[in-house]
Image (tube, coloured by chain):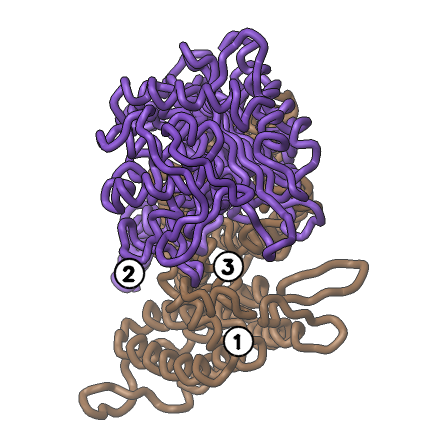
């Protein structure tokens, strides 16, 4: 079977999932199966088919599993969002359409994605500019103490970090393609550690400074961790030097510790993480209410969950509806998944992410040039770390920070940016798997 | 670079493993402690989603039921409102407040089965509780309310054979659909179980029982009824300071002669009196299926208002014998006194819950009558009953006579307020029919301007008994 036919067959589970999911929610809501669930399933299947046809026409050799895995995550996500708030699900579906358009545009515009290398400084400057936007007066806005978004009144709201992550990865992949040999072998040895010439470290130190700056200026630990983790992953793969990673992590830990004790918002997040069930912390402004209720929701789910649509997520008798856990459709969606589908459902979602990540790294391994390898590695690593940061925050592995769960959380920026990320991975994959003539 | 990518993937797998470990920690390892965390409102909201069973009167009148409150939750309404507010109570889960049967029978109305049922109960999403049928009688309860006629006071009626509480009313009552401690003219305070009254002469039934059952007296024992006599160093008078001369114990009860009963109590002695009081249920909270916080033990209070330990030398046993001396009793306790005499000396455990019926109409639990104490020998109970019958036939309680049905009773008129204020606290306890008692009552009115137990309280008792007997109890 050709790669594209395998992709087509692999889309079937996703379409079944979305139909079964909507049916489940409908049955729970109205005790009667509505044909709307089938309509939703059909529309979603149609969108998947369009995506598939775009890939079939433009990238015949691309990895056959990346797109179906995304379809599975996205269909699962839209069912979860529908269950939380049907209005948001309709909007999310519209973002899907826009995401698919940008997906197609990316594929067509960057058939030869390697030309991105030429614009690496432009790209990094735009990315940095994007990151600063939320801090600009008038358009920037704060959420839970962090500067996460940009709002153009009457037009749209978006989260620049979602797009900046792709730009930064492109820059790093390109930059390290040029300098990785020097970084890997050059320099003097001090205390048994080889230190490359300082001028090659410059941009990397800049990135470290950037990560810290994001924390200081935007109070956004999640994005900071995501970018920095992505950097270390690319750096490690490019140079093969674990010492860079260790030094990098130590530097980050040191910076995070300093900021954690000196920036009130960051400090509050750390306190919430460590003592979520302390009544004073629980009731405080920027307190642990969200984290604690996320954990309560997971506990309520148990091993098998309470069933689709069964978990208590709203405060009864509130009009308009008030959610028990703030941001159930974005930051806390993993807690809702666990509440309804239990440990098994949550683990299944994580495994789907791992499969996607595995295919991403597979693409990196198959790539025939360093830039492609580093770009695929970086995109996959940033994606993986983003999942870890938000799920880790909800499960209290690390402090909770506001990043989205890719393809599942509600949010236009997240959906569109991750579709662009998928398009780039498929472009790299198509080139890597193209038969050698 | 491929080796590094493999290792990087391995590292990410470890990170994701950590996520699964932590998810397992919350969903499995720490689940029960998290579910029970005091900050966790999920359990409460789950409770709100249970459609609790109804509480019904003995004739099927709905006293409490669940109505949809939006968002799949339920709230409680009480169709009979103030009529049964004291007995039924209320439940407001979101404020964590509950009272009365709503609290004490919550395990049934919420349908908290144990064992295999609970395992399967978990699988169904919409939990529905069981219905609770009570022993309460709406018709008699209404008669009690009407007969009290707005006076502060309390009426309790019990089936002496089973301990089933038929009537429990305390005036003023409150609207249990909207309990509000600040609402004027209403109170959640249940006089029937929490009111602390001086029982007055109704307590002479207890003294009589102790005197006869202990073997020291018979109904025909003759005792000097002159007035006043010195009791605990202080003169004690009869009503109107009347000197009765030598009289039998039966006559003494019929006309409620204080000086004779003070002598009987002192002669029987503090330990024996205490023993009989305990048998009747004094000194401990009643075994009623009602929240303990809403019941008080009937006991003896010292001058400071604090309870004196049973049998303490500080008890003025002579005055206690006539219902004074710091005795503080609840109407429920005095109804139990009447019921014990009525049921051949066998005091049954009072109860309001009759049976629990699940949604399939199957009775899952029936409350079987049980004996609380054998207070006195059956023969003694017959003698005391005969003496109490005299009270109604020719003594202070003639107002309670029911044409054709013999009634046994005892009046009480406790003086309250400052000396000379003429304020009284009228009492009446009774049971009927004497040969085959089916109902025992206690009635008290908080305050009367010179009224007597026989004139103020007895007619109320009469109406309630008449209603219950006409229903073929």
Q: Is residue A293 above or below residue B455?
A: below
Q: Which chain is brown?
A: A
Q: Measuring 57% from the left and 17% from the top, which residue is drawn there?
A: B401
Question: How far is disc 3 from disc 1 in space, using C-alphas?
Answer: 15 Å
Q: Position of residue A68 (x, y in %)?
A: 47, 38
User: Chain letter of disc 1?
Assistant: A
- The reply to whether label 3 and label 2 mark residues of one chain is no
Residue A33, label in figure: none
The residue mark sitting in front, 1 or 2, is 1
Which residue is outermost to the right?
A154
Q: Secondary structure at mark 2?
A: helix
x and y, in percent, of residue A22 in the image: 56, 30
Give residue A66's quadrant in the image: top left
Camera-nearest residue between A120 and B330: B330
Tag 1 residue: A265
Asked if residue A101 is positioned above or below residue B202 in the image, the reply reads below
Q: Are marks 1 and 2 on the same chain?
A: no
Residue A208 visible in this rendered orientation of the protein: yes
Identify whether A270 is placed above or below A10.
below
Chain bearing tag 2 is B
Q: Is residue A340 left or right of residue B262?
A: right
- Residue named by callout 3: A290
Q: Tell me, what hue is chain B? A: purple
Q: Earlier in the sequence, mark 3 or mark 1?
A: 1
Q: Position of residue B191 (x, y in %)?
A: 54, 41
Q: Name which residue lies at 57% across and 38% down.
A: B426
**Residue A370 falls in image quadrant:** bottom left
Badge 3 vs badge 1, beta-carbon distance below 8 Å: no
* Residue placed under numbered mark 2 in the picture: B11
Comparing marks 3 and 2, which lies closer to the viewer? 3
Residue A343 in view: no
């Amino acid at each position: 079977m050709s790669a594209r036919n395998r992709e087509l067959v692999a889309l079937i589970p996703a379409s079944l999932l979305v139909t079964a999911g909507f049916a489940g929610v409908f049955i729970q809501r109205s005790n009667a199966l509505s044909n709307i669930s089938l309509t939703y399933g059909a529309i979603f299947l149609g969108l998947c088919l369009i995506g598939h046809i775009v890939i079939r026409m433009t990238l015949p050799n691309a990895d056959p599993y990346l797109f179906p895995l995304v379809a599975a995550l996205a269909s699962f996500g839209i069912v979860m969002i529908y269950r939380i708030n049907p209005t948001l699900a309709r909007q999310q579906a519209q973002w899907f359409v826009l995401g698919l358009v940008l997906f197609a545009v990316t594929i067509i515009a960057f058939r030869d994605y390697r030309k991105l290398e030429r614009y690496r400084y432009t790209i990094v400057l735009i990315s940095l500019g994007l990151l600063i936007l939320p801090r600009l007066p008038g358009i920037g806005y704060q959420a839970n103490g962090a500067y996460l978004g940009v709002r153009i009144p009457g037009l749209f709201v978006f989260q620049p970090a979602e797009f900046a992550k792709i730009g930064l990865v492109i820059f790093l992949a390109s930059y390290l393609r040029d300098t990785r040999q020097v970084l890997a072998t050059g320099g003097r040895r001090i205390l048994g550690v080889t230190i490359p010439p300082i001028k090659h470290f410059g941009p990397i130190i800049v990135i470290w400074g950037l990560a810290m700056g994001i924390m200081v200026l935007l109070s956004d630990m999640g994005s900071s961790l995501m970018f920095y983790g992505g950097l270390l992953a690319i750096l490690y793969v490019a140079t093969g030097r674990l010492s860079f990673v260790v030094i990098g992590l130590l530097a980050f830990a040191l910076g995070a510790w300093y900021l954690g004790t000196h920036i009130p918002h960051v400090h509050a997040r750390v306190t919430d993480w460590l003592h979520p069930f302390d009544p004073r912390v629980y009731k405080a402004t920027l307190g642990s209410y969200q984290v604690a209720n996320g954990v309560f929701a997971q506990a309520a789910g148990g091993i098998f969950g309470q069933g689709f649509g069964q978990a208590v997520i709203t405060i009864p008798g509130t009009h308009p509806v008030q959610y028990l856990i703030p941001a159930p459709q974005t930051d806390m969606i993993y807690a809702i998944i666990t509440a309804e589908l239990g440990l098994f459902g949550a683990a299944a979602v994580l495994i789907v992410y791992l499969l996607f990540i595995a295919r991403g790294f597979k693409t990196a391994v198959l790539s025939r040039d360093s830039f492609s390898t580093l770009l695929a590695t970086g995109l996959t690593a940033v994606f993986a770390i983003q999942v870890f940061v938000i799920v880790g925050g909800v499960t209290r592995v690390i402090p909770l920070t506001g990043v989205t769960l890719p393809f599942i959380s509600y949010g236009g920026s997240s959906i569109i940016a991750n579709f662009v990320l998928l398009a780039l991975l498929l472009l790299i994959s198509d080139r890597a798997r193209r038969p050698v003539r | 670079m491929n080796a590094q990518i493999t290792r990087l993937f391995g590292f990410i797998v470890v990170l994701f493993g950590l996520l699964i470990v932590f998810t397992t920690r919350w969903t499995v390892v720490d689940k029960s402690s998290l579910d029970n965390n005091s900050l966790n409102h999920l359990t409460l909201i789950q409770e709100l989603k249970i459609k609790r069973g109804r509480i019904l009167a003995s004739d099927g009148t709905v006293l409490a039921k669940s109505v949809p409150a939006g968002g799949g939750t339920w709230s409680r309404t009480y169709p009979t409102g103030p009529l049964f507010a004291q007995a039924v109570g209320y439940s407001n889960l979101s404020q964590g407040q509950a009272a009365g049967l709503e609290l004490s029978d919550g395990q049934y109305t919420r349908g908290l089965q144990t064992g295999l049922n609970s395992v399967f109960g978990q699988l169904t999403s919409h939990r529905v509780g069981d219905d609770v049928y009570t022993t309460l009688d709406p018709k008699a309860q209404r008669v009690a309310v009407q007969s009290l006629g707005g006076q502060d006071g309390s009426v309790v009626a019990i089936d002496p054979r089973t301990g089933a509480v038929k009537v429990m009313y305390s005036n003023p009552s409150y609207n249990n659909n909207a309990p509000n401690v600040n609402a004027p003219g209403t109170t959640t305070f249940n006089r029937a179980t929490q009111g602390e009254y001086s029982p007055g002469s109704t307590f002479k039934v207890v003294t009589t029982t102790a005197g006869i059952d202990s073997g020291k007296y018979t109904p025909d024992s003759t005792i000097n009824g002159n007035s006043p006599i010195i009791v605990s160093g202080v003169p004690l008078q009869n009503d109107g300071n009347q000197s009765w001369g030598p009289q039998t114990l039966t006559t003494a009860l019929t006309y409620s002669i204080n000086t004779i009963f003070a002598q009987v109590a002192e002669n029987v002695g503090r330990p024996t009196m205490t023993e009989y009081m305990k048998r009747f249920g004094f000194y401990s909270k009643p075994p009623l299926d009602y929240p303990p916080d809403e019941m008080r033990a009937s006991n003896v209070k010292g001058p400071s208002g604090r309870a004196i330990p049973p049998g303490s030398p500080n008890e003025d046993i002579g005055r206690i014998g006539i219902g004074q001396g710091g005795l503080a009793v609840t109407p429920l306790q005095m109804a139990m006194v009447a019921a014990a005499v009525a049921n051949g000396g066998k005091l049954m455990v009072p109860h309001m819950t009759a049976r629990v019926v699940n949604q399939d109409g199957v009775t899952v639990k029936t409350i079987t009558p049980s004996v609380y104490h054998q207070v006195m020998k059956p023969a003694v109970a017959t003698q005391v009953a005969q003496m109490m019958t005299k009270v109604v036939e020719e003594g202070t309680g003639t107002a309670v006579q029911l044409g054709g049905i013999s009634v046994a009773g005892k009046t009480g008129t406790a003086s309250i307020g400052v000396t000379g204020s003429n304020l009284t606290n009228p009492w009446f306890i009774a049971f009927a029919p004497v040969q085959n008692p089916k109902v025992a009552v206690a009635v008290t009115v908080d305050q009367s301007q010179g009224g007597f137990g026989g004139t103020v309280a007895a007619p109320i008792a009469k109406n309630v008994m008449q209603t219950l007997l006409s229903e073929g109890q």
